[in-house]
Image (tube, rainbow, N blue to C red):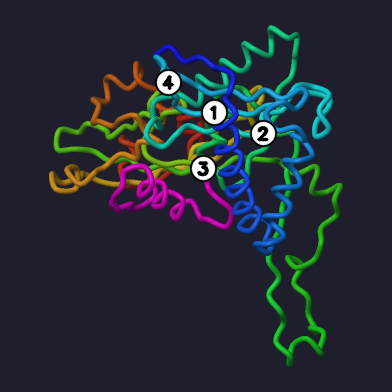
């Protein structure tokens, strides 16, 4: 694959910009609870601030991504000095066209943009991503992006009339705003969940994400409000295109912090042995996976990162007993 970034044409820019405004307005409605008209106006306003002259706007990088002369997507970035983030280059949008997704183009586009920015002596690149877009977050993290800031929100349901007039006699500590300094000192951890499926030969079902070079078991990071089991079932449905059984807990594995990453709790559930019918029903999502297969346990070290291979072997040994691990090992009593 030889992906190159080319200057965008005027008609292509107008078409892409209109689609981007509609999509961004929809995100504002879903993620921030804005009314449709307000979201549309805000999307238009933000684009006009950053691109006042459209395709000819100063400091704008608007590129069409092409592979062997075929357009596969586009991106929009701004050089340092732009009004939104003057201290660094900023990637405002990157998009792979639907018919070309699942082939690693997004990763190649970001790499090509980084090469172009280095040629202009740019030393830092940033971007925004909505918290619910776990697939994009996984891609960006694998490319070395780290979290700079987080925004949080919740919907407040109106209190019933008979409750609104009377203050509760007893207040649960969980409803009280905690001391910010106390919260700042708490340990931050990532949480993810995966499931271990086997075939009749004892091989393990592994998947190949489009955003990384090593294999995984089905699963992923928890979304807001999910339990590990709920997240695991959702990820199986999204990745494999079918509702497969997710049984009891095999292990919880603690992964210590490392450079650029907080520590993590990894829940591994037992999916059991899949039947031929269940296996035939699997339809890998092309925008998330480039493939899947059953792999022999002896081959795992060559297919995935060592800590995951070790975790899988430990879980197979534990069967359905369930245990607590640290980096794939049973702690010493």
How far apart in space, not on screen, are marks 1 and 3 (Cα)?
A: 27 Å
Question: In which image quadrant can residue 264 be found?
Answer: top right
Q: Tag 2, which secondary structure? A: strand
Mark 3 neighbour class, 10 Å CA radius: few under 14, some 14 to 19, many 20 or more: many
Ranked by sequence position, the earlier of labels 4 and 2 is 2
Ranked by sequence position, the earlier of labels 1 and 4 is 1
Ranked by sequence position, the earlier of labels 4 and 3 is 4
Q: Which residues are magenta?
A: 222-249
Mark 4 neighbour class, 10 Å CA radius: few under 14, some 14 to 19, many 20 or more: few
How far apart in space, not on screen, are marks 4 and 3 (Cα)?
A: 18 Å
How far apart in space, not on screen, are marks 2 and 1 (Cα)?
A: 11 Å
Q: Nearer the viewer, mark 2 or mark 1?
A: 1
Position of residue 170 measured from the top left corner of the image (x, y, whole percent): 78, 80
Q: Residue at x 75, y 39 (%)?
A: 149
Q: Nearer the viewer, mark 4 or mark 3?
A: 4
Residue 221 tag number:
3
How far apart in space, not on screen, are marks 4 and 2 (Cα)?
A: 25 Å
In the picture of the structure, the residue carrying the numbered disc 1 is: 74
Q: Would residue 168 be found to the left or right of residue 283 on screen?
A: right
Q: Nearer the viewer, mark 4 or mark 2?
A: 2
In the picture of the structure, the residue carrying the numbered disc 2 is: 92
Task: Note whether 180 is above or below 135 in the view shown.
Answer: below
In the picture of the structure, the residue carrying the numbered disc 4 is: 213
């Amino acid at each position: 694959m030889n992906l190159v970034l080319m200057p965008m044409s005027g008609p292509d820019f107008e078409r892409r910009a209109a689609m981007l405004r509609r999509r961004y307005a929809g995100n504002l409605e879903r993620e921030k609870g804005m009314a449709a008209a307000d979201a549309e106006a805000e999307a238009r306003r933000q684009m006009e601030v950053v691109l006042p002259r459209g395709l000819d706007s100063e400091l704008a990088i608007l590129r069409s991504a092409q592979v062997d002369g075929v357009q596969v997507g586009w991106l929009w970035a701004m050089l340092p000095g732009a009004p939104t983030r003057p201290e660094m280059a900023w990637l405002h949008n990157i998009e792979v066209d639907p018919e070309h997704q699942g082939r690693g183009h997004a990763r190649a586009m970001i790499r090509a943009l980084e090469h172009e920015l280095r040629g202009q002596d740019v030393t830092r690149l940033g971007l925004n991503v909505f918290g619910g877009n776990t697939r994009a977050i996984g891609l960006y993290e694998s490319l070395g992006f780290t979290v700079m800031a987080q925004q949080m929100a919740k919907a407040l349901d109106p209190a019933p009339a008979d409750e609104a007039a009377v203050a509760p006699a007893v207040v649960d500590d969980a409803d009280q705003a905690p001391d910010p300094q106390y919260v700042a000192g708490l340990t931050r951890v990532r949480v993810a969940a995966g499931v271990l499926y086997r075939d009749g030969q004892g091989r393990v079902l592994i998947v190949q994400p489009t955003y990384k070079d090593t294999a995984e078991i089905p699963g992923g990071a928890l979304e807001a409000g999910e339990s590990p089991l709920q997240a695991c079932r959702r990820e199986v449905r999204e990745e494999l295109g079918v509702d497969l059984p997710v049984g009891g807990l095999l292990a919880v594995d603690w992964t210590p912090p490392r450079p650029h990453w907080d520590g993590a709790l990894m829940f591994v559930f037992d999916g059991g042995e899949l039947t031929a019918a269940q296996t035939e029903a699997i339809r890998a999502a092309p925008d998330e996976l480039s493939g899947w297969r059953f792999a022999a346990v002896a081959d795992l070290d060559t297919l995935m990162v060592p800590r995951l291979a070790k975790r899988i072997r430990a879980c197979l040994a534990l069967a359905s007993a369930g245990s607590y691990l640290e980096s794939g090992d049973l702690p010493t009593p």
